[in-house]
Amino acid sequence: MGCAKIKKMEIRVRIAPSPTGLAHVGNVYVAIFNYAFAKKNKGKFILRIEDTDIKRHNPKAEKVIFDAFEWLGLDYDEGPYRQSERLNLYQKYAQELIKQKLAYQNEGAVRFKVSSGKTNWDDLVRGKIEFQNDQIKDFVILKSDGYPTYNFAVVIDDWLMKISHVIRAEEHISNTPRQIMIYQALGAKLPQFAHLPLLRNADHSKISKRKNPVAISWYQKQGYLPEALVNFLCLLGWSHPKGKDVFSIKEFIKYFSFDRVSTSAPIFDLKKLGWLNGVYIRQKTDKELVQLISAKGGSAPGGKSFAPKGITSTLIGETIPLIKERIFKLADYPSLIEFLVKEPKLDVKLLLKKSRQNKKLIKKQFELVLQELPKVEKWQAEELEKLFRGIAVEQDYHLGKFLMAIRIALTGKPVTPPLFESMALLGKKEVLKRLKKV
């Protein structure tokens, strides 16, 4: 845990993603901690786009970043600033360092001259960190094409934007001594540094798109709720003082402190995120879920609907009470209820395997059901349940096996919303038609 004290000053923090592709969940994780620290201290949360990597720069990626921040409710107070619009500043300060003989020209580039001694700082998460300067060679600050390197641009920007606290991932620890040297060479005031633990996979490898879905748009498309994803990311590397797992961003801001940030790498566990998302889904009203599942909710990118084709808003509303306790993300919805709008193809092998009954017995059961079902006057779940339980008792059928055969015949799946409520929604005519086919 960190032991450095936070100095009293105007709090200004930033998040500085590179627009080279997707909006990465790791960037958002760091952004949330910056956002909370700024809000708690009535400071400013600034967005800066680090777009000086010409080869990897993707103009469309900026919009992806903006959309992700908007979806998650992370409003920035200033920005977006773009490094590509500040090239004259980097060139100006590189020339000043050359004049002071603290940097020099080398093959068209400008290199910073590393002095002897050591460089250290009090990290707000990790305490005192120290590097021996003789382990660091002279390094490029301005490339031959006139563009700055990361370590130089970030110092000039943070200094001129009066960034008070640099809160970022631990992978930047090795960059920090170089950056401190540049601050000192410019006679600039140092910000305070806080290095957060990196997100890890279950095997403790660094989270990456090769092993995990890391694009924020993927979580949108899967139907994770933004408040659930924010809550989940708050839990990675930070612990609630009351031991809570479910809390709002406002509560995170209220209790945030670097003392509660861990130095050990948190595991990015999709199962826990699924559980947490389910909690947030069940907190929604039925009406809110209808809006989220239908295109009107606009919860998926581009306002895409999570509902299958052919379903009405009325029918979605009727299904919500049946599936609310069963889904972990909104993308689970279609597979649970599509049998209501599309007749499933009968899989005889699945029917026999899951019901654990033979063809002869199933045929007998269905013939009996088809005799009795037309007699049901009130087509309601309670009446249907009463009928089927009565048949099972009278004929000495195993209730679970008997109902499993009916379920698969009507829905095509062994796991669905409650059977009798589903039959009530399907309607008498459709139920009889599907059972006759079997």
Image: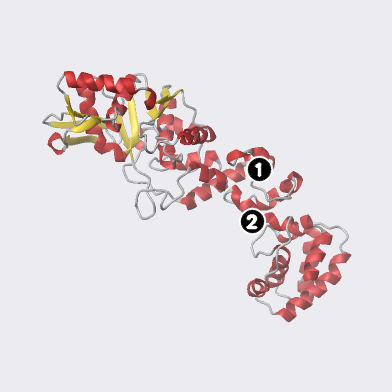
Query: Residue 8: in sight, yes or no?
Result: no
Tell me residue 185's x, y (percent): 19, 22
Tell whether 8 sits left or right of 38: left
| Front residue of this view, candidates 157 and 238 | 157
Task: Pick the quarter of the image with the C terminus.
Answer: bottom right
| Residue at 37 percent of width and 34 percent of height | 54
Tell me residue 211's x, y (percent): 41, 53
Tell whether 102 sits left or right of 34: left
Give the spatial CA distance, label 1 vs label 2: 16 Å
| Front residue of this view, candidates 285 and 304 | 304
Query: Residue 79: in sight, yes or no?
Result: yes
Which mark identifies residue 289? Answer: 1
Color theme of the render:
secondary structure
Which mark identifies residue 335? Answer: 2
Q: Secondary structure at mark 2?
A: helix
Q: Where is residue 414, by image quadrant?
A: bottom right
